Image (tube, rainbow, N blue to C red):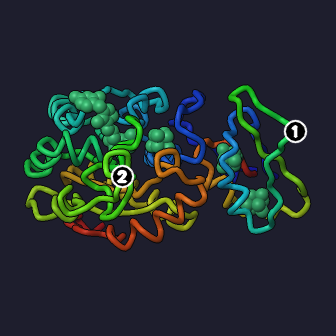
Amino acid sequence: MPLKFKKPDSLTDIAMHYCPGCTHGIIHRLVANAIDTLGIEGKTVGIASVGCSVFAYNYFTCDMQQASHGRAPAVATGVKRSLPDRIVFTYQGDGDLAAIGTAEIVHAAARGENITVIFVNNAIYGMTGGQMAPTTLNGQVTLTSPYGRRQQEGHPVRMSEMLSTLDGARYIERVSVHNPAHIIKAGKSIIKAFEMQLRGEGFSMIEVLSTCPTNLKMSPVKALKWVENNMIPFYPLGIIKDGSVKV
Amino acid sequence: MITINEEMCQGCGLCVEICPRKILALDESKINDRGHTPIVMTDENACTGCSLCAVMCPDCVIEIE
Ligand SMILES: Cc1ncc(C[n+]2csc(CCOP(=O)(O)OP(=O)(O)O)c2C)c(N)n1
Ligand code: SF4
Ligand code: SF4
Ligand code: SF4
Ligand SMILES: [Mg+2]
């Protein structure tokens, strides 16, 4: 009898270094499952970024490259343009994509590069110990916003909505992994984005709301509730832009 | 039938919380090689094979057939 649930073949057997209950692990599994489902492991190239997911290259069996902070969309552009038959994705945190890498993501989207971006928004700089990110919510306490984020620190940036105004961006959706129903939905969205790339349809980004229990200083269960109750009201889920060819 | 790869478990409790039958628990008597308290199945017969625990697990600890 076939297994009803098993670890995707496109994930290595290496134990991931993420903290207990961190949803980076779930998102890795969804990306690997998409690669398995589409049978593209042999021609996929992933670009890891800087942040807790810096070691993502250890966890996927496909070809991987690590980019310097924020530069993953530029590296992905180079790989995709020189090897157009490859399926190229970036895996970037919110510090990486929305702070130091803002220029790269904006221009990759504006150019309409035929790549897929997995944008993991956990509203914080996880790796470096919990500093405020551009995506940190108003009032959210972090290491560098000890009184809660105030107006003088700027308002949180909704990257998906911002990028959707660019003509080059074809598909942008925000999903979440705070419960099984949303995890399954997120997995389908990632498959859709890869399928679009296979058809040469251009730039796609899936923003995944994620948790950092360690720096939120909450249990993993409470951190999922925090995403549901605090992040989703500010970062509404759903398709933000759909320029995909209907098939 | 669920299979638990105890050595990969980080004891985060996400599966324990989501299981509708409340048959997964952290086994406080154990520490695995990763230094965590792994889960244990407390009543195999009550498991419906719904897979919710496996879907929630960030570490691919649980397989279901
Ligand atoms: C050029 C450069 N500047 C700053 C850093 C420090 N740094 C490492 S990771 C990081 C932020 C990561 O946050 P995010 O992308 O949200 O990833 P997370 O860890 O939350 O998944 C920063 C600022 C660096 N490594 N390189
Ligand atoms: S610091 Fe946060 S984002 Fe990084 S692995 Fe730990 S929980 Fe995950
Ligand atoms: S498969 Fe369903 S019933 Fe069985 S342990 Fe997992 S969550 Fe509980
Ligand atoms: S969700 Fe996975 S890692 Fe967390 S306690 Fe359950 S089996 Fe262990
Ligand atoms: Mg982050």
**Residue at position x 43%, y 32% from top?**
A56
Q: Say what secondary structure mark 1 lies in.
A: loop
What secondary structure is found at the residue carrying circle 2? loop
Residue B60 placement, left or right of B40: left
Residue located beneath label 1 in the image: B29
Which of the chains bears the disc numbered 1? B
Do the residues indicated by labels 2 and 1 lie within the same chain of the protein? no
Q: Residues within 10 Å of mark 2 (few under 14, many from 20)?
A: few
Residue A42 place in picture, x, y as percent? 41, 31
Relative image position of residue A139 (x, y in whole percent): 33, 64
Mark yes or no: residue B2 visible. Answer: yes
Residue found at the very far front of the displayed protein: A147
Q: Which residue is mark 2?
A: A146
Numbered disc in front, either 2 or 1: 2
* Label total for image: 2
Q: Residue at x 73, y 26 (%)?
A: B33
Position of residue A127 in the picture relative to residue A132 (left or right): right
Q: Which mark is residue A34?
A: none
Indicate left or right for A41 with A79 as reference: right
Q: Quadrant of the C terminus of chain A?
A: bottom left
Residue A117's spot in the image, x, y percent? 28, 47
Residue at (31% x, 26% y) in the render: A66
Question: In the displayed structure, would residue A54 be above or below residue B27?
Answer: above
Q: Is residue A63 above or below residue B26?
A: above
For marks 2 and 1, give the CA distance: 38 Å
* Quadrant of residue A157 within the rendered picture: bottom left
